[in-house]
Image: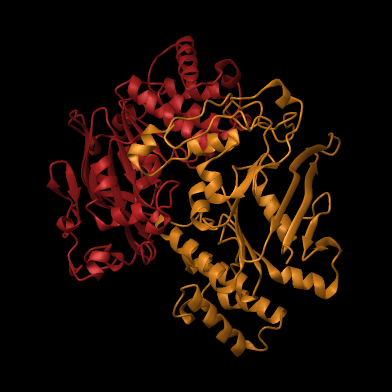
Chain colours: A red, B orange
Amino acid sequence: MGKEILKLKNITVEFQLRQGIIRAVDNVSLDVFRGEIIGVVGESGSGKSTLASTLLNMVSAPGIIKNGEIYYQDKEMLKLSEEEYRQYRSRDISMVFQAAQNALNPVLTIRDHFFDTVKAHSNMSEKEIVDKACMLMEYVRLQPKQVLDSYPHQLSGGMRQRVIIALSLMLDPNILILDEPTTALDVITQAYIIDLLANIHNDSDITMLFLTHDLSIIAKIADRVAVMYAGNIVEVGTVEDIFYNPIHPYTSGLIHAIPSLVDDLSARRPIPGSPPNLLDLPDGCRFAPRCGYHLGGFCDGTVQGDLVEVMPGRFSTCLEWERMVK
Amino acid sequence: MGPLIELKNIQMIFENRSSLFAQKRRVQAIESVDMEIKEGQIYALVGESGCGKTTLGKIICGLLKPSEEGVYFNGKNVWRLRGKEFTDYRRSVQLVHQDSYAALNPARTIFQSLSAPLFRYKIAKNRNEAYEHLEELFEMVGLTPAEQFLYKYPHQLSGGQRQRILLARALSIKPKLIVADEPVSMVDVSLRISLLNLMLDMNEKFGISFVYITHDLATARYIAANGNIAVMYLGKIVEYGQLDNVLSKPRHPYLQALLSAVPIPNPKIARSMKPLPLKSLDMPDPTNPPSGCRFHPRCPYGEERCSREVPELAAVEEDRFVACHLVEKIPEWKWGQ
């Protein structure tokens, strides 16, 4: 395993609303190692998209980064000025947004998108830009001649998503953040994009942060996984750890709640209850009202555990994690 | 006993013009679909976006009139039913929508929305009766205590709760068939199974048939484990049969490609799966579908004949139908290949 390329320390993001303050991301710490694919899984409202925009210092109003530090290659990012931070976006940390349909400007051709992005960050000539764009597009199996002069509406969803991936790689970033990159796509296109991302990862030493609600995709592509619930990271481990021996009841519940095409159907169990309202969080452990271990009387649920390294490389917030080890 | 609903050679053609003087564009959304829906059975209708599965669902409910008439309810053509017989059909076949927020009137409380059909079908005479009836239903779908939900507006409830309310609404007038169009795709992953279990319960307790429309093969397998599956591609059913049988031994190349592409939540299996080498990733333009077999431009096994002749949905074994000329030649497909 490589060195940490990105370190998050005690990140808290707050949204001040009329009804009260929401902590969409609450005291989250995470190390990302150079060259790995780390998956961040969570249901809607768990804070994964907010976490992604925090990394680029682009949390949208009324959200503010209340607390915490982000170290990129040992440089404290949140202390930088807006202009200094801008230099890092796309060049060092690049992002592929959810719903690629909306990430492209409908009145610009694909060629203009490439020009805009590159000219904002470097002084490559137009010919260099077009050459590099063509190379990247061929790499993602698009026909550059045809696509470069198209407008976004002339392309299919899968093609747009591939354009965005090519665009995000234009400046050779070190870190690529992918926020639900395949959610709106058909199954076959999705499988192709995932394979493509795996190939990009194999061919370069790019670090990927893959955010999704879909555990199946994580199983296919990630090296390590962080599981989010109600604004917290509740478990971190390698993909094998998470799937075959989870040590947080939420992770285990989630794995048993997904129907799949190969498993025994009678082993599927829903997680009782529903995710908490962030405005009205339970005192103590946020998962306690739905947790089999708490309801079974193993813990009193009054203490919200911190994310602790309970075994080498394995983190969990659960106080009763030992009971889950097989 | 005959089937509850029978679809005979359904065709659905949509026509539109992009401007007043432009040529009409024709989209054939459904091309000659035959299907029988029996009482107490569960059917999964699976396909990718644009394959016509939602259109077919609406045709079954009588919300869209097929270009060729061919929906039969208890043996009678529904588009010729009048009066009481038509009311009976409307009542017997209910639809549950994908977007639970859009399916409920935002300006009405849940009680107002859900009591209307009870009065319409004279199941309840007054508010008190309606309340008691709904209270019982809400208990059944796991929304207790009922008074906590009945006087709320849709925006005050979560997606999972609204979806349960839609199921309660469909149930309230005692239908024989519920067409559920992607009922769980907008619900949190941890809650999906409980909704599917609810539908299975209703099927067992009241013998209600379900047509479960989805793009997600895994949830289809969960709900229709003992039922049938129809796989659609560009307006046609390409494979049909008992679900376990179909998913364990897919015969049509499209279904094989689809199964190879579905991500499996198990790292060892997921990483061993290899995609079927399709010739093209993108679905053809439905306004200008390919000649012959609609899958031939993408099919890795395609022959010259496939671009000329349209394959019929034919029996390959008992209760198993595949629409492919080369079905005998296509190699067997296994998990992890």
Q: Is residue A66 left or right of residue B314?
A: left
Seen from the viewer's position, the closer of residues A75 and A190 is A190
The residue under the point 41% across, 46% down is A214
Q: Is residue A231 visible?
A: no
Residue A272 appears in which quarter of the rendering? bottom left
Residue A207: quadrant of the picture: top left
The answer to whether residue A263 is above or below residue A181 is below
Q: Residue at x 20, y 67 (%)?
A: A301
Q: Nearer the viewer, residue A25 or B49?
A: B49
User: At which x and y percent is residue B325?
Assistant: 69, 31
Where is residue A220 drawn, in percent x and y?
Answer: 37, 37
| Placement of the N terminus of chain A among the 4 image quadrants | top left
Residue B141 seen: yes
Residue at point 48%, 42% (across, down): A183
- Front in this rendered view, residue B315 or A210: B315
The location of residue A238, given as percent across then percent down, is 24, 40
Residue A52 percent across, percent down from the top left: 34, 41
B192 left or right, relative to B283: left
Quadrant of the image occupied by residue A181: top left
User: Please, is residue A25 above or below residue B48 in the view?
Assistant: below
Residue drawn at (70%, 51%) of the image: B56
